[in-house]
Amino acid sequence: MAKHVVIDSIARSGTTLLSALLRSQDKTMAFCPGFNEPLSCLNIADWPHGVCRQEFLENAEIDLKKFKEESLSQIVDYAQYYGLSKDEWRSIIFDADSPESVRKNIEKAFPEVDVFCYRWNQSLFYFYQWENKGENHLWLSMIRNPLDRAISSFEKHKWEYEDSLRNTLAFLDKAESAKQSNQFKTFYYEDLIENGKEEIKKMYDFFGVELNNINLSDIKGSNGEDFIPQSSKIKNVNEKKDGYLTDAEKFNGLYKSGIDRYKTATYKLDNGKEKPMMSEETRAVFKHYLLGSTEYSRYFK
């Protein structure tokens, strides 16, 4: 039976990159985005901060109509066809009576695939619902330096630093519980950048799937074309193709420019002078709350 893996984290943690890397390996498909059960749940908090801070759900009820409509829309909007037509995807999705049936239909359509991945940022509140679906339902969460992520979230999404910190604490609280399960595992963005092949090998070990060759060069986006990294520095946020901002070059290798950005990131004042994007006081607040945690202490020693 195929493995179904959620790729989750707080926004700007590298999950789009990870989805592309996994998608480009043998016998693997990765939807980014797609088939998002958590956001089809009834009576959840508002996106993005509310759902990020949402407590674990019990006995979640899915709005199946919303799930199907949004799933097909994301296949089309991001050109995630994988060789099938829009009508074939419509049948896969709408001829099912539950999200589980949709996954079964996807398995039947792609019998050669061993790993199906779904990127669902801010969705850790759904972990136990996912875990209960069976041992082949796994959850991978990416962790990135919260200071770098806060800078990137401010640049890309205009998140205030307080929101980034509160979201980090909410994620940490749930991760502390979820990590007791062998169906949950965390990986670090910085480790992926530094040791890409080694980290991907660890991920497939977690999946329980053997991967003979690791591809880090021919990386594909959701649309099957060359992957375009979605940097927070992209300025023209209105120019998109198949869901991707296009004001950037295609992937040309794992790059370290996103590591420790908080140390050098600046913005210009009206007088032309540059000022640090994150103050020492803000860094100190993050450190105060996160230094003692297992997941984040490495960034504040």
Image: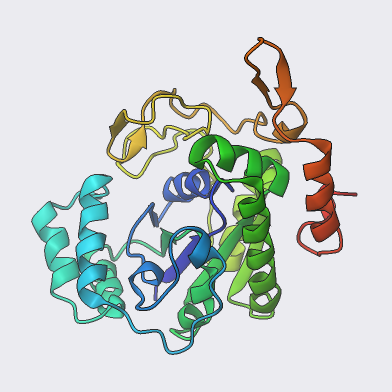
Residue placed at 13% from the left, 53% from the top?
A: 86
Residue visible at 59% across and 61% down in the picture: 141
Q: In which quarter of the image is residue 194?
A: top right
Q: Position of residue 293 (x, y in %)?
A: 81, 64
The residue located at (65%, 34%) in the rendering is 258
Q: In this view, does 67 lie above or below 189?
A: below
Of all residues shown, which one is farthest toward the left?
87
Residue 1 makes an appearance in the image: yes
Q: Is 25 or 252 nearer to us in this picture?
A: 252
Residue 208 visible, this angle:
no
The residue lying furthest to the right in this view is: 301
Q: In this view, does 127 lie to the left or right of 116?
A: right
Residue at 53% of width from left, 72% of height from top?
54
Image coords of residue 269 (percent x, y): 65, 18
Q: Is residue 97 above or below residue 84?
A: below
Residue 198 located left or right of residue 121? right
Residue furthest to the bottom in view is 59
**In which quadrant of the rendered view does residue 204 lie?**
bottom right
Q: Where is residue 252 in the image (x, y as percent from the top left)?
A: 51, 26
Task: Work out whether 267 lies above or below 134.
Answer: above
- Please name whichever residue, 290 or 90, is drawn nearer the observer in this view of the structure: 290
Residue that lies at the very extreme toward the front in this rendered image: 270
Q: Which of 257 and 169 is in front in this view?
A: 169
Query: Residue 217, percent across and down?
Result: 50, 33
The quarter of the picture where the N terminus appears is bottom left
Q: In this rendering, would 104 be left or right of 22?
A: left
